[in-house]
Image (spheres, rainbow, N blue to C red):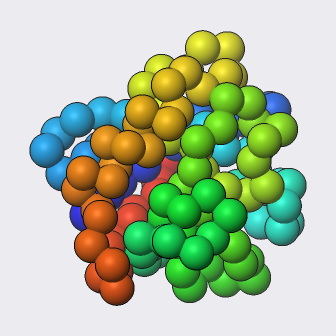
Amino acid sequence: MLTIKRTYEKLYTKGVMLMPDGTELYTLELPWLNNKPYVSCIPEGEYFFMRDTTGRHTYFRLISVDGRTNIEFHPARHVDQLEGCIAPCLQLINGNAVASRTACDKMLKFYNQLHVKYLLRIYS
């Protein structure tokens, strides 16, 4: 299981993501705004995600998020580049993601099989 432990800030949400081998990555998301599409992070809970080869960013897509669609893990540097998605990164500095593409590529090493559903748990 992939886990993200979140901390909520006024302008963004930051998280620590624990990979299967124990590696910690970080995440950048929009602030919590009651799950409003395109402007809020998704609610805490458990979700499935899959390898995505057809989406906008072609990394991973979350499925079964109530009231939401097109939620992806993808590279980003700033929170304004996210529309409800999650940006993995190697470091967060003042709400800015550092080496996000590298972090997404690290995820690909573990979760690269097509048509397999993986479990994600998000909590604070």
In the image, 119 versus 100, the foreground residue is 100
- Residue 71 visible somewhere in the drawing: no
* Residue 83 place in picture, x, y as percent: 79, 55
Q: Residue at x 86, y 55 (%)?
A: 39
In the image, 29 versus 59, the foreground residue is 59
From the viewer's perspective, tell me whether residue 120 is left or right of residue 78: left
* Residue 91 place in picture, x, y as percent: 48, 21
In the image, 55 versus 63, the foreground residue is 55
Q: Residue at x 52, y 33 (%)?
A: 100
* Residue 68 place in picture, x, y as percent: 73, 77
Judge whether 31 appears above or below 46 on screen.
above
Quadrant in which the N terminus is drawn:
bottom left
* Residue 25 place in picture, x, y as percent: 37, 34
- Residue reaching furthest left? 21
From the viewer's perspective, tell me whether residue 96 is left or right of residue 33: left
Q: Quadrant of residue 31?
A: top right
**Tally of numbered tags:** 0
- Residue reaching furthest top? 93
Q: Quadrant of residue 118?
A: bottom left
Q: Residue at x 43, y 26 (%)?
A: 90
- Residue 55 visible somewhere in the drawing: yes
Q: Residue at x 58, y 42 (%)?
A: 75
From the viewer's perspective, tell me whether residue 75 is left or right of residue 114: right
Judge whether 91 appears above or below 73 on screen.
above
